[in-house]
Image (cartoon, rainbow, N blue to C red):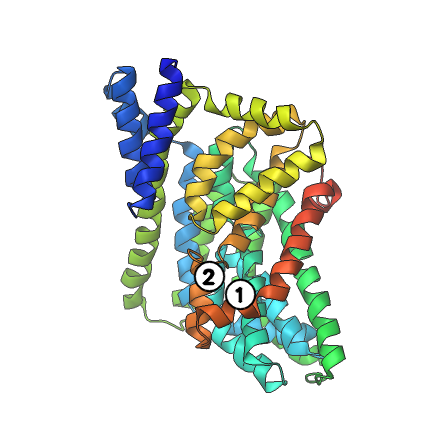
Amino acid sequence: MSSDAIAIMILIGVFLLLLVMRVSVAVSMGIAAIATYAYLKLPLQLIVQYTVGGVNVFTFMAVPFFILGGELINQGGIGDRLIKLADELIGWVHGGAAMVNVLASMFFGGISGSAAADIASLGPIEIKLMESQGFTRDYATGLTCATAVQGMLIPPSHNLVIYAVAAGNVSIAALFLAGLPAGIFLGLVLGVYSFFYARRRGYATGHRFNLKNTGKAFLSAFGGLMTIVIIFCGVSFGIMTATESAAVAALWSFLCAFIIYRDVPLRKYYKIASSAIKTLSTIMILLAIANTFGWVVAYLRIPNKIAAAVLSLTDNKFLILLLINSVILGLGCIMSISSILIIITPIMVPILKALDYSLVQFGVVMILNLGIGTLTPPVGASLYIGSAISGLGVTRTAKALLPFYLMMVIALLALMYIPVLTRLLGAW
């Protein structure tokens, strides 16, 4: 057996063994990398070099600002205003509360970029509103969890930024241009399903449409909506880099939370910043160690070997994409989003290039895929948050999500095989 084959066995074996022993992903990758470096007699100084290099990436500088801005919006009183605006815009249709749920999550996702924040902030209000129109708590909870995934696709999505770093040389602006229509498309799929469900069950409509009240709701939510404009337009039209737009958006979010709306006292900023730092620290440690792990993966040419193996099974592009997404969907049930993005993306890039498949389109598909994973046991964070705010329990919440799993998979397949759905705002 060649030394490279033994090194691959050590790298993967140690990593998987430690994961089974419930060691954190970052520590597991670090120990596996050190063991492999030692076996290959590579200079251990490389570990320090590549660990530091993992976070010394200019593109990644946007992530801290996106996370801070999301926390400020999450805890700064924007949610109620967005729900009021969504209610005025679409609450008058059959089962209007369900439509409000979809639209409010679309708005909030375009500000916070976090599914978990969406569920935690808007969930209690959305579930109560839906129950008032006759929806069961199970259905309301399932829809609330499913619509929150829009936030992972609609800019600002720090997961899209992490994907751009992991994939290498992928434009964040292009990802944002692809992510916005993809997130809206997911919302349309969930909204259409909920509309016909409400009609079949005979649920009542909400209030009648009132242009004056809609205008008032829009003005009230304008400060929060401007965050979307700053980030999306700033990056997409080349006015600002992703990092610059993230910094400006974070500053604007601060002004909205503490000066314009003043729903929270300034002393709460320490708690908000601490929460953002905690989230950021987890991602940065993982990204740093993953770079060391990724270097030895590339050194052993593992991505090329996997690409060759997959392409040898079939030359059918449809089947290969289905296989790739099935693997990612399975991993999403047991690993965190950041871990999968950092570990799996570099492995998939050679396969996608061989298939002449757009890395931008795949980025959007991968994020949606992982969003579904956040709603599945045993590791789905969004599933547990939805369970907690609804009081249904994890098992019952997962059962309530069954029809929405199907809707999200349908949206996933459409985005995977119909490029125009991610190219509506321009070619990339």
Q: Is residue 358 above or below residue 41?
A: below
Q: Quadrant of residue 20?
A: top left
Q: Is residue 222 left or right of residue 193?
A: left
- Residue 77 shows up from this direction: no
Give percent across and percent down for residue 199: 75, 78
The disc placed on residue 382 is 2
Q: Is residue 79 left or right of residue 254?
A: right
- Pick whichever, 215 or 27, lies toward us: 27
Q: Do residues under tags 2 and 1 come within 8 Å of each other at their CB atoms?
A: yes
Q: Marks 2/1: CA distance?
A: 7 Å
- Identity of the residue furthest to the front in this view: 1
Q: Quadrant of residue 379?
A: bottom left
Task: Residue type at mark 2: give it.
Answer: Ser
Give percent across and percent down for residue 413: 68, 48
Q: Residues within 10 Å of mark 1 (few under 14, many from 20)?
A: many
Among the two numbered marks 2 and 1 on one chain, the one whose residue lies closer to the N terminus: 1
- Work out which quarter of the rendered image holds the C terminus and state it: top right
Give percent across and percent down for residue 93: 73, 77
Q: Residue at label 1?
A: 145
- Pick whichever, 309 or 353, lies toward us: 309
